[in-house]
């Protein structure tokens, strides 16, 4: 009878380090479920502000899910925080891929904000995020990269000059397609991740309640303040401050970072 030292070591390792963690994992899962159910209950009771806070806390503590993102956006929608709800849903489309319900929710918000949405054609590079996910683009990138590698190996190994020529040019074509999917996927991923952040550059910037110079002032904004851009129209942008207050500022008063 031989002793499998490796097997004993692995058994001890998993037994000592992972078994005590299992109750903790179960406790965290139960806490996440309870937090989510609390948010749903608040939403059904039309306490949308508290429901929004509950869903945000659940996401920050337990991680994202499609259901959580939708519930968060719907809570914001019912508080008339249309731009914030749109941003949550657009990021969900990028993260989870095109989803019929997500697209329907975005369309509903689009009808409520006709004056702040772009009137350009839907089929722009940025709007491709509604049609294809970054995960799909990543898979296509890997597929064509492997296909290019296989063709290049074929080019090296075969002796027929005709096959070598076809394999070489096909390998180059597949590599270029792979790079195209890589660049497009990276662009779509970072569009929402980074283009939505900016910094105030003008000490005379004023946060207003609506995109009009005559609208009530909310507060003065100091230069250097980091903001989140929720929506952009011709001259104004709707922004969110670090303290979660939102309003409108002139586009010329900030720079994207």
Image (tube, rainbow, N blue to C red):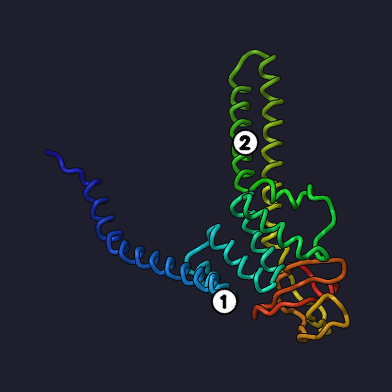
Q: Residues within 10 Å of mark 1 (few under 14, many from 20)?
A: some
Evaluate if marks 1 and 2 touch, with contact meaning CB atoms under 8 Å apart: no
Tell me the quarter of the image containing the N terminus. Answer: top left
Give the x, y percent position of residue 93.
64, 54
Q: Nearer the viewer, mark 1 or mark 2?
A: 1
Residue 81 horizontal side relative to residue 217, left or right: left
Give the x, y percent position of residue 210.
81, 77
In the rendering, which numbered label is found on residue 47? 1
Residue 212 horizontal side relative to residue 199, left or right: right
Number of marks in the image?
2
Location of residue 133 with respect to 39 vertically, above or below: above
Residue in the foreground of this view, choosing between 6 and 81: 81
Residue 15 horizontal side relative to residue 213, left or right: left
Give the x, y percent position of residue 188.
70, 52
Location of residue 123 with respect to 175 vertically, above or below: below
Real-space CA distance between mark 1 and mark 2, rounded to the nearest whole angstrom:
50 Å
Quadrant of residue 152 in the image? top right
Quadrant of residue 107 in the image? bottom right
Residue at x-position 73% and y-position 69%: 229
Residue in the foreground of this view, choosing between 94 and 104: 104
In the rendering, which numbered label is found on residue 127? none
Q: Earlier in the sequence, mark 1 or mark 2?
A: 1
Location of residue 204 with respect to 146 vertically, above or below: below
Tell which residue pokes out farthest to the front in this image. Answer: 45
Element under disc 2: helix
Dot 2 corresponds to which residue? 145
Element under disc 1: loop
């Amino acid at each position: 009878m031989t002793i499998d030292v490796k097997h004993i070591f692995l058994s001890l390792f998993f037994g000592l380090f992972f078994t005590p963690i299992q109750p903790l994992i179960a406790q965290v899962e139960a806490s996440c479920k309870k937090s989510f159910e609390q948010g749903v209950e608040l939403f059904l009771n039309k306490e949308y502000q508290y429901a929004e806070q509950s869903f945000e806390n659940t996401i920050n503590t337990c991680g994202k899910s499609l259901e959580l993102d939708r519930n968060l956006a719907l809570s914001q929608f019912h508080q008339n925080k249309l731009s914030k709800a749109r941003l949550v849903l657009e990021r969900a489309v990028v993260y989870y891929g095109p989803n019929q319900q997500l697209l329907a929710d975005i369309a509903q918000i689009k009808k409520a904000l006709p004056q702040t949405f772009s009137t350009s054609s839907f089929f722009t590079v940025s709007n491709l995020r509604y049609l294809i996910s970054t995960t799909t683009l990543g898979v296509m990138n890997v597929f064509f990269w492997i296909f290019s590698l296989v063709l290049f190996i074929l080019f090296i190994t075969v002796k027929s000059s005709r096959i070598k020529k076809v394999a070489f040019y096909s390998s180059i074509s597949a590599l270029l397609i792979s790079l195209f999917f890589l660049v497009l996927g990276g662009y779509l991923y970072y569009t929402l991740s980074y283009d939505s952040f900016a910094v105030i550059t003008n000490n005379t910037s004023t946060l207003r309640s609506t995109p009009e110079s005559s609208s009530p002032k909310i507060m003065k904004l100091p230069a250097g303040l980091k903001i989140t851009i929720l929506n952009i129209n011709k001259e104004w942008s709707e922004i969110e401050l670090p303290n979660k207050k939102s309003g409108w500022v002139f586009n010329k008063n900030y720079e994207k970072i």
